[in-house]
């Protein structure tokens, strides 16, 4: 083919994509640009098209059924007639390793979806230009013997053009790799590059006995509040400023990366002991405690820091980073704005928590929970007035597990909601049975503790109604105990829910009164029927007989507000006598009975105890 034929020849482009819409859009773009465009939905159609007419350029999608783009590319490169046809991948896969793989198997370029029209045209034109140049070289070589002198200058020009194209391609590949390994917002290394550098540091510790390093994980405290209140643009600006401050705390040997969101990772290089890492953490906390003066706002922010000594006990960087994260979450749990150094027992605790969560899920399915009942005594009559339902877990291997050992995990994972509703359902069913028994009073009450999270469930009241309907228990006999944490957030919303419970004649008890955020204003706002005095105050009452602590005041508050007072943890006759003299209404504790099974409850009621 001579130069005149090349000029008259209309460039042929073959597009291979299983998405009809993509074929239509690309075909339209390239046809308007003056190219002859053919389309194929799969490998077989593409093969047939190439046998009919060899294209000048192939645009190839990666994600296709049966035979993906990588395999199609390899088949074309293995066929002599198509081996030199340039192939450009067009794909939604944007990971650097997908791109590297594409280049390794012979692609000349890579366009990420969704693509820009101008970008497609420029990249196609670049490759067509390169292809044309290659054809020119072939033509020149075939005529070299006859026209060496005439074509020497043209050959040199063409080679220069090729070199420029190669340089552009190499520069583009370098930029793509840099973008894939760095955070676009802060310019810091990202998690992928951070893990690679961690891996190098671990390898070095195995090769050099005197080499040591430390890893820090930092998570911004209350960053979500800034994002939600001031907007994501302000949040992004804050992250950039935080990154610059963190860099100022480090040396040129250290590595800092943005691991994602508001979390950063630091590798402190060439240390002698963990104390140096602690000093850096303290310096970071001090610098970040200063206000951040942004373009429109002044913001205060601090971080929780996990510290881990990068020793030879780790084979994988992911495990080292995992344990550093664990230390960081311990710092958050201890009050935020501080650091915590990882200890091996933390990992074991994390594993135990995960096992506990798995066991709890199985326990719900297998109905391993049981309820014990502790009697509540009327101080005036000395008789049983009701019971408090107390949850126990009959673990298949650990035996009887008390709620203090598993309720925190249940609350954190959200499993507390189905557990709570099961307790309420079971307790109401049991109360209905006891009230119909000849030895029990019709006025017998049942007290049930409910977790704070349950009150924020949208179907909470509907669930209560279903239980009352199913068990046919008298709502006036049901007492729901609520800790003060329930009423500390969304007070208007909680007030409505509590009033709906009151409308159903259900009694409301403030549990552990005096141990949390007790405020008389809260008592006035919410329709409580009783206050439960924590056992710690009852114990102090006996130890300090002169003024008996706060118990008299608590009973006085309850009486003045038309509520009853219930004392927990009564263990001695002296405590009972003191409570009686103070006109306390009800009491429970080991003096009367510990929590017992439902079978023993009947025996206890049949004995008609009197205190």
Image (tube, rainbow, N blue to C red):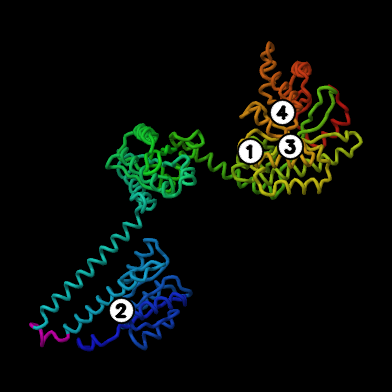
Q: Nearer the viewer, residue 565 or 43?
A: 565
Crowd tier of the residue under label 4, counting other residues whose Cα lies within 10 Å: few below 14, some 14–19, many 20 or above = many
Q: Earlier in the sequence, mark 1 or mark 3?
A: 3
Q: Is residue 194 above or below residue 604?
A: below
User: Which callout, 3 or 2, points to the residue nearer the camera?
Assistant: 3
Q: Earlier in the sequence, mark 4 or mark 2?
A: 2
- 219 relative position to 209: left or right: right
Magenta: predominant secondary structure element? helix
Q: Is residue 49 above or below residue 346?
A: below
Q: Which residue is mark 4?
A: 532
Which residue corresponds to the image point at 53% horizontal and 41% vertical from the top-left? 350
Kindly state the secondary structure of the residue where label 4 is placed: strand
Q: Which residue is mark 2?
A: 85
Kindly state the secondary structure of the residue where label 1 is placed: helix
**Could you tell me which quadrant the C terminus lies in?**
top right
Q: Earlier in the sequence, mark 3 or mark 2?
A: 2
In three-dimensional space, the C-alpha distance between marks 4 and 3, rounded to whole angstroms, equals: 12 Å
Q: Which residue is mark 3?
A: 480
Which residue corresponds to the image point at 40% horizontal and 86% vertical from the top-left? 48
Which residue corresponds to the image point at 23% horizontal and 85% vertical from the top-left? 7
């Amino acid at each position: 083919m001579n130069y005149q034929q090349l000029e008259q020849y209309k460039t042929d482009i073959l597009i291979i994509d299983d998405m009809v819409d993509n074929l239509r859009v690309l075909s339209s773009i390239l046809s308007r640009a003056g190219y002859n465009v053919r389309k194929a939905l799969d490998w077989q159609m593409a093969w047939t098209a190439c046998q009919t007419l060899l294209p000048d350029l192939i645009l190839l999608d990666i994600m296709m059924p049966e035979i993906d783009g990588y395999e199609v590319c390899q088949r074309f490169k293995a066929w002599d007639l198509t081996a030199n046809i340039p192939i450009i991948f067009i794909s939604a896969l944007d990971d650097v390793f997908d791109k590297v793989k594409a280049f390794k198997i012979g692609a000349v370029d890579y366009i990420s979806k969704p693509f820009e029209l101008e970008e497609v045209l420029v990249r196609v034109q670049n490759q067509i230009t390169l292809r044309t140049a290659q054809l020119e070289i072939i033509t020149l070589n075939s005529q070299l013997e006859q026209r060496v002198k005439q074509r020497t200058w043209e050959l040199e020009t063409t080679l220069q053009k090729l070199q420029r194209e190669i340089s552009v391609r190499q520069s583009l590949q370098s930029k793509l790799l840099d973008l894939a390994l760095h955070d676009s917002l802060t310019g810091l290394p990202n998690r992928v590059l951070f893990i690679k550098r961690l891996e190098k540091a671990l390898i070095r510790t195995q090769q050099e006995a005197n080499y040591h390093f430390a890893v820090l994980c930092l998570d911004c405290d209350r960053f979500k509040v800034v994002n939600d209140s001031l907007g994501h643009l302000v949040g992004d600006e804050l992250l950039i400023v935080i990154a610059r401050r963190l860099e100022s705390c480090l040396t040129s040997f250290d590595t800092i990366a943005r691991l994602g969101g508001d979390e950063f990772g630091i590798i402190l290089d060439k240390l002698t002991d963990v104390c140096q890492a602690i000093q850096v953490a303290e310096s970071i906390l001090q610098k970040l405690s200063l206000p951040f003066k942004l373009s429109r706002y002044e913001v205060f922010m601090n971080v929780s820091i996990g510290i881990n000594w990068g020793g030879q006990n780790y084979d994988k960087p992911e495990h080292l980073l995992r344990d550093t994260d664990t230390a960081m979450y311990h710092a958050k749990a201890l009050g935020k704005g501080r650091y915590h150094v990882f200890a091996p027992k933390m990992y074991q605790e994390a594993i135990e928590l995960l096992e506990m969560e798995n066991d709890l899920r199985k326990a719900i399915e297998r109905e391993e929970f049981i309820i014990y009942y502790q009697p509540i005594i009327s101080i005036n009559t000395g008789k049983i007035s009701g019971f408090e339902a107390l949850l126990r877990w009959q673990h298949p291997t650990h035996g009887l597990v008390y709620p203090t050992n598993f309720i925190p995990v249940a609350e954190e994972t959200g499993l507390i909601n189905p557990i709570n509703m099961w307790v309420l359902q079971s307790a109401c069913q049991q109360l209905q049975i006891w009230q119909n028994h000849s030895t029990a009073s019709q006025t017998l009450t049942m007290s049930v503790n409910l977790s704070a999270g349950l009150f924020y469930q949208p179907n909470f009241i509907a669930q209560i109604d279903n239980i009352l309907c199913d068990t046919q228990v008298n709502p006036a006999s049901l007492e729901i105990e609520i800790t003060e944490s329930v009423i500390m957030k969304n007070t208007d919303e909680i007030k409505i829910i509590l009033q709906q419970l009151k409308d159903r004649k259900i009694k409301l008890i403030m549990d552990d009164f005096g141990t949390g955020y007790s405020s008389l204003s809260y008592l006035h706002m919410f329709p409580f029927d009783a206050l439960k005095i924590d056992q710690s105050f009852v114990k102090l009452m006996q130890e300090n007989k002169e003024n008996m602590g706060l118990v008299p005041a608590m009973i006085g508050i309850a009486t003045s507000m038309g509520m009853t007072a219930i004392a927990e943890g009564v263990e001695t006759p002296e405590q009972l006598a003191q409570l009686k003299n103070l006109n306390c209404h009800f009491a429970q504790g080991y003096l009367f009975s510990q929590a017992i099974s439902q079978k023993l409850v009947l025996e206890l009621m049949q004995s008609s105890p009197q205190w």
